[in-house]
Amino acid sequence: MSRADTLRCFISVELPPDLRSSLYRATSALRESCSRARWVPPENLHITLKFLGNVKARAIPGLVALLKEHLAPFAALEVELQGAGAFPSPQRPRVVWLGVREPRALQALQQAVEAAAQQAGFSPEERPFVPHLTLGRLKEPRACPSLSQSLSTLKEAPFGKIRVDRVCLMQSRLSPQGAQYSVVAQIQLKGGRNEQGQV
């Protein structure tokens, strides 16, 4: 099977452009504190609900239909972005993130996405879902005192709110310049903008 027959995909909550820009500005101190990290550009900031990997193009319509079925009961919701941290720890960071508060409704939404993906034949996620926005990555956990200090100053900082009115199936194209994301399909939640007749 050729690469043209498959898409590298994930399912996510996307952010409005103005919020992406403001988050990027608000986290500039983190980027300045650690040049070794590979920082996510603002246009790629999102909340991952399920990473799928390579998906056969012919399987996309069935997957979208299952997502619509499983997400039909869900209404639009609001989540708050607050605090910065790192996995596995700020002292030895590998993934730098922004936290997502009020996650119970988002947890339920992610479980429905997971159920749809499993019904479509994708492997279940072994790790528990921890909602976050990835800001940057290091190749391996290593001490970075200046980054740890910057994270401590943003540990409880508020970064705004997201109205989650849709879930997106995204394609990721890898290149030497980094990943480029594009929307494959959008599943509207009840009360979403399209249902209200807005563009």
Image (cartoon, grey):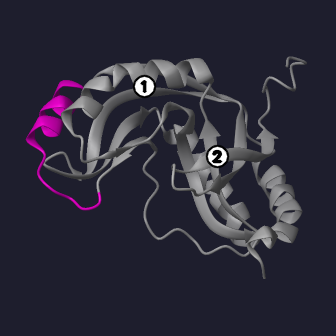
Q: Is residue 93 above or below residue 79?
A: below
Q: Residue at x 63, y 61 (%)?
A: 114
Residue 158's spot in the image, x, y percent?
36, 19
Question: How many badges with numbers are in the image?
Answer: 2
Q: Residues within 10 Å of mark 2 (few under 14, many from 20)?
A: some
Q: Is residue 42 above or below residue 89?
A: above
Q: Residues within 10 Å of mark 1 (few under 14, many from 20)?
A: some
Q: Is residue 26 above or below residue 13?
A: above
151 part of magenta stretch: yes
Residue 190's spot in the image, x, y percent?
80, 32
Q: Is residue 65 above or below residue 83?
A: below
Towards the viewer: 95 or 29: 29
Q: Are marks 2 and 1 in contact (CB under 8 Å)?
A: no
State the residue position of label 1: 24
The amino acid type found where label 2 is placed reads: Tyr
Residue 152's spot in the image, x, y percent?
16, 31
Towards the viewer: 86 or 2: 2
Q: Residue at x 78, y 27 (%)?
A: 192
Q: Could you give the CA–CA distance between mark 2 and mark 1, rounded to whole angstroms?
A: 17 Å
State the residue position of label 2: 181
Q: Residue at x 63, y 54 (%)?
A: 172
- Going by the image, does 116 lie left or right of 34? right
User: Which residues fall within the magenta stretch?
Assistant: 139-155
